[in-house]
Amino acid sequence: MFYFYNMIKIIILGAGNIGTHLFRNFNSSKKTEVVQWYNRSLDSINQYKKEVPVTNQIKELKKADVYLLALSDDTIPKIAKQLKHLKGVIAHTAGSVPMSVLNESDNYGVIYPLQTFSKNRDVNFENIPICIEANNETSYQTLFELASALGNNTNKINSEQRLNLHTAAVFVNNFTNHLYHLGDMICKEQNISFNLLQPLIKETAAKIENMTPKDAQTGPALRNDKNTLQKHQDQFPDPDIKNLYLYLTESIQKNNEQSKL
């Protein structure tokens, strides 16, 4: 196996949620050196210029072992085309963008941390699965070493698997959080504290550490408790929320029926 005996030199491109977290962690790691930070707007990164050189010009990028594109999905292919002359590994961090958008470079890959990121909330990378893909063994080993500088939970995942994993992540994270938001709205309308639901939220999440989500399912939809289901529906003045409730109820019931076949 190939190992870096010197620190891996990185340039981070992008200063959004994930780019900022990657900078903080790589900049504090003894295994990596952030030699530069690129962002289209310098306003987002000027506060760090005493720690690392910053730029908003692609042509000013320095030499590095890895150029890490922590950019929006639409921006990745455009920026990647401008980096094809560089000798380091070109890698992006997106869940739904195929590795092939980087194929004009000699060495390229993906390093995808499977987590939700907000700039003002710290995360522990030791607990985050990091999915790696590369176009050749040398690039893979470089990205493996880079991922290992963040944590120990590294996984070899191809583009198709990563897209499906990202889709699953949207269901369990983004959609679930939206349902939290709707629950919060219902509570506020009745002057009830959303904090009363926190133990329930935590227990639901804790259960699926030892049970499958299907086995952990409870509630009036699963029981086909028609009286309760109707009472809930009668509460909703917003037809969109009512339709969402009905759709999710039907989805639970259909999946439960299928599991009995």
Image (cartoon, grey):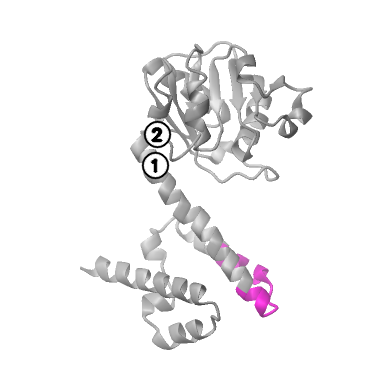
Q: Which mark is residue 182?
A: none
User: How many other residues sit within 10 Å of disc 2, few (<14), some (14-19) or many (≥20)?
Assistant: some
Give the farthest residue toward the bottom: 227
Q: Position of residue 209 (x, y in %)?
A: 46, 54
Q: Earlier in the sequence, mark 2 or mark 1?
A: 2
What SS does tag 2 mark? Answer: loop
Give the residue number, with chain letter if any, for mark 2. Answer: 98
Query: Is residue 190 shown in magenta?
Result: yes
Task: Using the image as rendered, state which of residue 169 and residue 200 is in the foreground.
Answer: 169
Q: Amino acid at mark 1?
A: Leu
Give the residue number, with chain letter if any, for mark 1. Answer: 163
Q: Is residue 111 visible?
A: yes
Q: Position of residue 215 (x, y in %)?
A: 37, 64
Of the 4 image quadrants, the one containing the C terminus is: bottom left
**Dividing the picture into quarters, in which one does residue 14 lie?**
top right
Discs 2, 1 touching: Cβ within 8 Å: yes
Q: Residue at x 67, y 68 (%)?
A: 195
Which residues make up the magenta segment? 186-201
Task: Using the image as rendered, state which of residue 53 and residue 223 is in the foreground.
Answer: 53
Q: Is residue 234 above or below residue 249?
A: below
Q: Amino acid at mark 2?
A: Pro
Q: Residue at x 54, y 37 (%)?
A: 72
Q: Residue at x 69, y 31 (%)?
A: 41
**Dividing the picture into quarters, in which one does residue 227 lie?**
bottom left
